[in-house]
Image (spheres, rainbow, N blue to C red):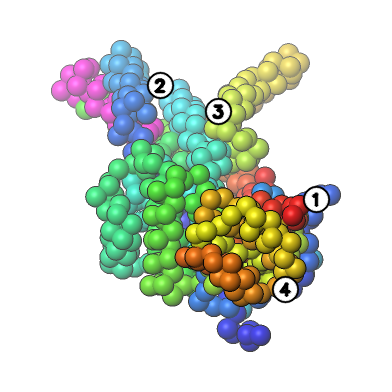
Amino acid sequence: MHDIWTVVWKEWKEFRDQLLSLRRGGLSAIILALILGVVAPVQLGVEWVESRLIVGYWPFLAATMVSSLIADSVAGERERHTLETLLASRLSDSAILIGKIIAAVLYGVGFAVVNLLLGLVAVNVAHSDDKLILFAAQRFIVTVVLTILASLLMAGIGVFISLRASTVKQAQQAFGIAIIVLTMGPLLLFNALGYETRRTLITWLSGVGETRIEAYVVATLLVLSAIVIGGALARFKRGKLVLD
Amino acid sequence: MPNGSALAIRTEHITRDFGPVRALDSLSLEIPKGIVFGFLGPNGAGKTTAIRVLLGLIDPTAGRAEVLGLDTRREGSAIRTRCGALLEHPGLYERLSAYDNLDFYGRAWRVTRRTRQERIRELLARFGLWERRDDPVGRWSRGMKQKLAVARAVLHRPDLVFLDEPTSGLDPVATAGLREDLAALAAQEGVTVFLTTHNLNEAERLCAQVGVIRGGKLLAVGSPESLRAGRDSGRVDIVARGITEALVAELRAHADVQSVVANGDHLSISLAGGASVAPIVAWLVYQNVAIEEVRKARATLEDAFLDLMGLETGDGDQAGGPR
């Protein structure tokens, strides 16, 4: 664990130094926080807190953040010629990789949670009539759990993509395609089903109930994340990385 | 021959292939502990591959290697725990400060917080970088980055340090500075250093032993003196007054002389194989030449290196020139 946290510490130092520099990322973070955590909640009001969309919206945003960070963290080490020195240290392959994944996931989840809380404050300041507006507890918990799992899945996919890319830019371009496939793929697949099949599926989903659907999604993401991260751990080996 | 425990590195016929390319070809080396060992060779000779094998980053295709008594195939992690490395690139995190770069690797090697703080201060001060410790490394010059990378390599007091061309790309002043720092460091820390370099002057000044590699094959190994031995050019430089053209012509006909180049008061004489300079000097004195200085030219490590590479030096051309 010590070695994993050492890698997390280093990654966070790099994120932090990037965020503290306005030109290198700080400004983008402030603008994003203003739009997502202040402007949108103030405009949408109570709807922003009560909408079911937050269950999908925040995991998607966090996963997008993670994709950018994991590309920088993995492909960036190669591009900036720091990877071989890192591999020549006593840190194990798995400690390096897990540390990088945890750092990126913490960042993505932290980004979502901070914006959720910021938005909550903004909504209460702008729209509260002496009554505290809060998220429904279950929805908030499910949102956070899905945000964690979506971030983990994206981090695992990101490792595969980044290991094949020689630059951060290449990795981020490949990520763009992966995100389109992951988001549009299920919709296109659904449309490709016959009319009767789609009707049956919608009827079945309506009968299952929100809680059970959320449980299915959590279980699916959990299994997919475990598979992808397991594969990433098998792929992230010194001997291979040095020769790549 | 040193016994196993006195050796920092022992390789037995290690070969490493990359597809059809043989990067290392039956390399056998024995490097004692506590010395600076120079590994010399042209680009693509196999120096970096040798370091990667020795650090357990890649396995040899054939043969075996031991570093600090540990097998590179099975005990790579234990080897890396006891070694430090400055590889082809400085490998520094340019967005982080110098202090944080060292702090990260100190944590990675599990150096305790207090020791880490003291050691970082000691090393940064030694290399003259302490005042700039909070600057992001990306703003530094290449020479400063190389110094910081050397500091990182020795931070955890390793038993063995690999330095892959540490002065490559540095200007002469930065090279001389880093070379002095490396010499002091090796002496003070008592660490074994495996140094690859193109800079033969550097190798000659720093290394107790050198190995010369080309095409993955070890061509020679020994002290710089032993590599130079037997490669003396047989050239003698004499500074004297009273040298005439007639005297130079007579000298060229001397049985012990192969060739003579005269330039004012300066004579550069190539002696015939095995000939001594004493009879020549005695003859010149007899001819009323006032001799001020007689200096036998010694082969440098560069002469020995180029000789091993199969190249001829300017001296060689001169020595073999017409009389």
- What whole-number distance in Å separates the C-alpha atoms at marks 2 and 3? 35 Å
- In the rendered structure, find residue B21 and report the number of the disc placed on it: 1
Kind of residue indicated by mark 4: Gly
- Mark 4 secondary-structure assignment: loop
Q: Name the residue under label 3.
A: A169
The C terminus of chain B - image quarter: bottom right
**Contact? badges 4 and 2 (CB < 8 Å):** no
- What whole-number distance in Å separates the C-alpha atoms at marks 3 and 4? 66 Å
Kind of residue indicated by mark 2: Ser
Residue at horizontal 18%, vertical 19%? A129
Residue at horizontal 29%, vertical 63%? B122
How many residues crowd mark 4 within 10 Å: few (<14), some (14–19), many (20+)?
few
Q: In this view, does B301 lie to the left or right of B265?
A: right
Chain label for disc 1: B
Q: In the rendering, at what x and y percent does residue B201 appear?
A: 53, 58
Chain label for disc 2: A
Q: Mark 2 points at which residue?
A: A51
**Residue lying at the far right of the rendered structure:** B20
Can the viewer see residue A190? no
Kind of residue indicated by mark 1: Val
Q: Do labels 1 and 3 share a chain?
A: no
Chain label for disc 3: A
